[in-house]
Structures are given as structure tokens and as C-alpha cells.
Image (tube, helix red, strand yellow):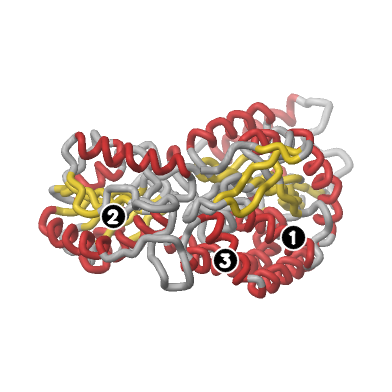
Amino acid sequence: MTTPLQSHGTTATIAIENPATGRVIGHIEDMTADHVAELVVRARAAQPAWAEIGFDRRAELVRKLRSWFVANRASLIDTIVAENGKTREDALLAELFYLADSMGFWAKNAGKYLAEDKIRTHSPFVLGKKVVVRYRPHGVVGVIAPWNYPLTASVGDALPALMAGNTVVLKPSEVAPLAVEQVVRGAIEVGFPIGVLQVATGAGDTGAALVDCADMIQFTGSTRTGRRIAARCGERLIPSSLELGGKDPMIVLADANVERAANVAVEWSIRNAGQICMGIERVYVEAPVYDEFVSKVTEKVSRLRIGAPGDFGSTDVGAITFAPQLDIIESHIGDATAKGARVLVGGKREPGAGRFFQPTVLVDVNHTMKVMQEETFGPILPIMKVRDDEEAVRLANDTPYGLGSTIFSRNIAQAHRLARRMVAGNTWINDAIMSFLAQEAPFAGAGQSGFGSGRHGKDGIRKYCDTQTILTTRFALTREPTMFPNNARRSRRFDRLMMMLWGR
């Protein structure tokens, strides 16, 4: 677990641990509110010039950062693995691959998504006038990121904000901040102006200070913290966009490709030790294929290798990054077994150094259990037998969350009908999570899983802007018929016009 604050001279610091070994690998400053305010002042001073250089120059710098990013990939992977405890494959694919692609995506598409919209109006009173809508950056965007994907959910959110012309202050999790610091140093190295992209390191008070002085907040994390951030942003009347917790369901119908469904279930419930906000956290399987599905999943999970990440291919399941998460995982399994659930494989902490939890399959579960109702965020796969698709959809929607959902069926038309009944921001048919890579499409949550426009697509960058509507009257009468003074005859004509237009 992260060690307590230590005083190094006059500056309080936080020790960063490798969760796979328990060794301290570095320290970060626990920034005060005054220090955070200084960063925001610097960012605000740099923002007008950053916006003024335009999309092409900003895109050029982002592409330079991508070149630096790829050239330094080995060092970045080392840092992510050390501070997060995830496997090298998780770091490479879910962090570096995604971000390298995302840098190119926003460099290419930001100008198109934020181009002025020319409005064709229907109103007879605006005929002959030109109406355009432009997108103006908010100013300073505060990005508060989680520990499970330290780069994807920090730099990944900063990219569209930067391309929109904002400056950004990144507040990484105090559990895994080192890779973020490394990328920000790289941005300065390739030519980003001072103040455009900065890091505010520290614990919860540092994030709260950023919420108190930034012009817009992008937050990824727990629903509990998200509520507090949304409330504070509401008090300040500044915009916020929040991606929060999840309890994503998977439905396996009787006609499904059971082998693929089992592979996807294991992959996206156990990948990154289950520490994925849109990971599969509960599965509902129709009775005719339930035994086959459980058998396949149990066999696949039992073969997974767990341990400290080494080189590529050395292990499948890494560490639990955040120490208190181990207690939550154990409590969910304990609650489930006390109420009748059975553990088919796993179910315990892995003995030895580091923080590891055995990949676990639970059966005989029901909705009285925490593991089916509350976010677990661990390598746990609870499986429940259902009579039919109606029961599966009802149970899948029996949650306050709504980030992702998955349906497996060979009958695509039926799967689409069911998908439209799922209360979720994203639904995958015969797959899971992969729409996150289709950055042209929005990725957002429903219910307590999200607030705001989400990530990706045109709304994923427009959320970092205010809109400004500009109307231009070039050719017009000096005095229009609707202007003062009021005239009874003229007003009656407008009354008759209203009846002609809309009264029949």
C-alpha cells in the first residue's frame, strides 16, 4: 500500500510502490492548493497563444509527441508495469497502442469536428441573414485520472482538449503518476509551449484544488468521487464530464458461439486483473448452454498464470494496483459464498510478495449478493443461469450503472432487438469493449456510469468548447416592419400571418 506522506524538507511527498513487489520505486510531490492554483494561472496565461496557433500547428506538435512516444515505448512500458503492476501486454496494447492511434486521430479530425457550422434556418424572420456556430475552447481543462489506466485515461483525455485549443493540467492518481510525468516531459521536449500541458501530483486534496480553479473538469473514477466533483462544478457553474463506475453485464443466449463467448468473458473479466471500468462483471447464461459455458470458462481461467510481470509472455494476470481493492474483492466473494455461491476456481489472495488475487469463477449467484450489484473491480467472473432472454435482460438492467453491455447470439436480428433494450451507453454483440477503439463513435455511460458527453467522436472534443452563435445581417432595410413604434394595422397582419402559417 502507498506509504504515508513523508516530509522531504519543506515539501510533502508520497511514496510510489510497485504493487507486484511492494518496493518503493519513486516519490511525487503532494501539491498544495496554492501550488495547483499557480499551475492553473500559468496554464491560463499560455492558453490564448496556444489557441491562436491553430489546428495545423497543434496537430504538428501532437504528431511530434507521437513520434517521441513510440521511440520511448520501452521506457514507458517499464514505468507503467512498475507503478501499476499490470502485464507488459496490457501496457502495450491498452495504453501505448491506444494512445499512439489516438494522437493521430485527434490531430487529423479536430479541425473537422470543430469547424464552424453554417446554419440553414427555417424562420422567416431570419431569411437573408447568415448564422454560424463556432466552437471556442473553455480555457484551462483539469483532467483527473484514475490508477487503472494511468496514460489512457489521462493523456487520452488531454489530447482532444489540447487540440481544441485548451491548456491542460493533468492530475494523475497518486498511486500511478510516474508515466504521466514522463509523457508531459516528452511534450515539452518536442516543443509544447511551457504551461500548455502540466502535471499536478498529489492525493485527493490536490484534485479538489484543481476542481476549484480550472475552467472545465474531465474526471474518470468512482461514482462516489464523481458525485462530489459534479456538485462542486455545479456550485462553480463550470462544465464537467465524468466517466464513473460500472457493473457491465454479459448475456449468453442458447444459440451463441459458446467457445467465443467463453473466451471473451475470460478476457474482459480478467484482463488487467479485472481492473477495467467497462470490464465484464456478471454473466447471464440461458439454461441450455449454461453447463457448457461454465465448464469452458472454468477450464480457461484455471490455466491463467498469475504473478509479477516480467518480459512479454511471462504471465497473464498482474497485480491489484490499489491495496484497498483487495479488501473489496474479498468482501464480495465472502458475501456471495455466505449466501450460497460456490467458488469453482480461485477465490483467494495469491500468497507471497506483492498484491495478487487469484482469477475466480463464481456460480450459484443471485442479485442479493454484492458481487452482482456493486462494482468489484477485480478478476472475478460470477455466472448466473437464466430461463430465457427476457429474464436475462431484466437482470442485466437491474443496476444503477450503465457503461457497457454484451450480448452473444448467432441471431443478429434478435441480438439487436435486445441491445436496444439494454440501459447502457455501449452494447456489444458477439464482442466486448472493442467500440472503444472506434474513436469516431461516442463512448459514454448511462445512469451512474457517466455524466456529460463521454469520449470520442465529435462530441468528445466539442465538450471541451463553448458554442458561440454569430448572426450577420449584411443587406437589410434601415427600418424593419417589426421595429418600434407598434402599429395596430401591422400587428393584425402578423396575427393573420400566424394563422396562415400554423393555424390550420
Looking at the image, tell me whether mark 3 or mark 1 is earlier in sequence order: 3
Residue type pointed to by label 3: Ile
Looking at the image, tell me whether mark 1 or mark 2 is earlier in sequence order: 1
Measuring from the top left, give residue 449's x and y in whole percent.
Answer: 45, 42
> Are the residues at dot 1 and dot 2 in contact (C-beta closer than 8 Å)?
no
The residue positioned 75% from the left and 49% from the top of the image is 136
Residue designated by label 3: 77
Left or right relative to 226: residue 200: right
Q: Which mark is residue 417?
A: 2
Q: Which mark is residue 185?
A: 1
Q: Residues within 10 Å of mark 1 (few under 14, many from 20)?
A: some
Residue type pointed to by label 1: Arg
What is the secondary structure assignment of the residue under circle 1? Answer: helix
Q: Residues within 10 Å of mark 3 (few under 14, many from 20)?
A: many
Could you tell me if residue 2 is visible in this image? yes
Q: Disc 1 or disc 2, which is closer to the eye?
A: 1
Q: Which mark is residue 123?
A: none
